[in-house]
Image (cartoon, grey):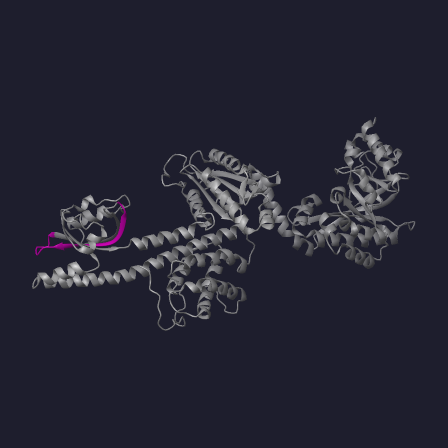
Amino acid sequence: MLPVKQTASPVSYAAREPAIGTARCDLRDDRLRRFAAIWSRAVHPTLSAPVSRAEFERHLVPLAAVLRDALHARPFDPRPAHDVGAALVAAHCTEPEALPQILGVIDAYLVLYLPPGHPMPAEESRARCSRLQHAVAAGFAQALAEHARAEEEAATKAARAGLAEAERALHTSEARFRAVFEDTSVGVGIADVDGRIIDVNGALQGMFGSPGRKVTGRNVGELVHPDDAPEFWSLYRELVRGDRDHYRVEKPYYRSDGSVVWTDMSVTLLRDAAGEPQYQLALMEDITERRQLHARLRYEATHDPLTGLPNRTLFFERLDQALETGAGTGPDADPAEEGAGRFGLCYLDLDGFKAVNDSLGHAVGDRLLVAVAERLRACATGSRELVARLGGDEFVALITGPSAPGEATALARRMLAALAEPVHLDGRDLSVRASIGIVDGAAGELGAAEVLRSADITMYRAKAAGGNRYELADADSDARAIARHGLTNRLPAALDNGEFFIEYQPLVRLEDGTVRGAEALVRWLHPVHGVLGPDRFIPLAESTGLIVPLGRWVLAEAARQARSWHTDGPDGTPFRVNVNLSPSQLRYPGLVADTVAVLQDAGLDPSALCLEVTENALIGADEEELRPLRQLADLGVDIALDDFGTGYSNLSYLRRLPVSTLKLDRSFTRGMQCAPADPVDVKIVEGIVSLAHTLDLSVTVEGVETGTQADHLRLLGCDTAQGWYYARPGPPDRLHTLSLADAASV
């Protein structure tokens, strides 16, 4: 029974602040107020009482504070959100369409507007948000049920009052009792202690849907239903034995057409004058619609509205169940089965789905997701298999049982095969590719957040390997990914705290063995991991955008040092410093201005600076992309093409690049470390040097490790070299300390 919308005077919340704990609620908190405003706009149209939206919004602020505090709490406890759901029902959110609006705002905006104040992985915050949604839905459903039950109990009390009056009137007027018995809207039935039904009223007869089929004369024991509560028949036997006088249960019955009616049934034992059990009196209310409403609310709270698949809430319920008890996902799962505590999880993410939304629109993207969901749903054929949509283009499959690990791999193969066929939409064939991370294990070993984190890491390994494939979780890979994440989080503070320093490796003129300059190589003195080379953190800085401020700092420090060398050099010859530029720095609009500012601040002539750019970063670059390098070259800055020879492009592109130096990749000179030199390497280097000099370019060779190698390169006409033969990277005061040791033999 749903509450009837009121049309009387507006309801005031002034004296009805929700008693749901001691959440920190400051009406001046801008984030809380913005979240409450969004929440109010979504939910206010569904209220069953005339309340102004401003008043309802003020009422939502403390509820939002409860959700915020629960999201941030350590340890995490979703129970306060249960009270939030109950408080919303008390605030007249009693219409069926209210719950999807309530949960939708929490799902979309809670983490966005009220994020945790302390570091927390994104997947954990989203998992917490999902658990809070489930708790809100549960509290809402329970409060709504209690709300409906209160109204129903009022009717029951009225029926009981009428029946009591009828019993008193029985001594004086059988006719008056019969009138109450027949006219009440509550189903009433009388049976003896042997279970034979003696009499029923019209309301009960109508409940069973069979006016022509008499209920009278049947035995209560015949009215069995598979969904009877386990304790129902025990209560019944206790009552007819006289061991109890009353019980109340919700019980289903079959109607004459095979459908089911759910009843809220209250059974009372009537005794004779001697106190012996004589009759059973049953009062029944039809609660079928209420049960259906609860089922619908539960379905909407646990299923994705776009695809119809289970959503995050239901998935995490099943995952928690599998991890904590080892119980299966299907209705026939048996937790006691040997090996039932095993689980397998496939985490699937579509490859390149963003391009579909960006190019064809979100409507087409949604239809593609629906088609993908249908194919994935068809792949889950076992009772222990659950496929859910976590959000966006992320899907997950959970399998439990003794053979779950092997079944998870088989399911991943089936899913990839199912997605191999293009999806036909609006005359287009859209190819679908997916990357899958697989995690398996036993109940009790990991928590849900750890399982999802491992699956997510593994899925991205599959993407990095080219996509359209699956990978199995690996503890070492997880540890490396977590370590990378820790380094990524530490990077901004490391730059602010001065944890980076620069080492310099000499650039030696091959003709006379003098030091021409040095390459600046950045290092990170990590407080836990010690000194880290650029291969450990430069890719992370690239992916986070920190490479621009870090590169600017390296350039400024190297320029300052180069100016010092220029001032302190014994013969006054300016030393050149080489600084590496990443692809992200090349695309940074302020590159030229920053470089000019650094040179001016350091008082360094542009000719003393050489910027190294990898060959792969310039392959295919158009004139707009090359413009910053041309501007720097016009200022007098040398541009070196690093790792030359590793790219896949025609050598004719050298003519249009603003470079003055080629840095030959070490892979071409390894064959010269010992005598006799590899003739193929000799010919390749000879050709490159000839080409470079023809184009008026100098040649620098990196990775020189032996004297024999240095001699070969000098004879071939290379201009400068660097490598462990001369010196390893070190502090700037050791620039002229050359070891001239055969590092390859060490």
**Residues drawn in magenta:** 258-277
- The majority secondary structure of the magenta stretch comes to strand
Report the number of discs. 0
In x, y percent, where is residue 556? 78, 55
Among the 4 quarters of the image, the one containing residue 464: top right
Inspect the magenta stretch and tell me whether residue 428 lies in it: no
Inspect the magenta stretch and tell me whether residue 272 lies in it: yes
Viewer can see residue 79: no
In x, y percent, where is residue 366? 52, 49
The residue under the point 15% across, 62% down is: 164
Quadrant assignment for the C terminus: top right
Q: Residue furthest front?
A: 427
Q: Residue furthest right?
A: 571
Please state if 438 lies on the left or on the right of 44 as rendered: right
Q: Which of 13 and 225 is in front in this view?
A: 225
Quadrant assignment for the N terminus: bottom left
Q: Nearer the viewer, residue 493 or 526?
A: 493
Please state if 569 lies on the left or on the right of 422 as rendered: right
Please state if 530 lies on the left or on the right of 341 as rendered: right
In x, y percent, where is residue 104? 47, 56
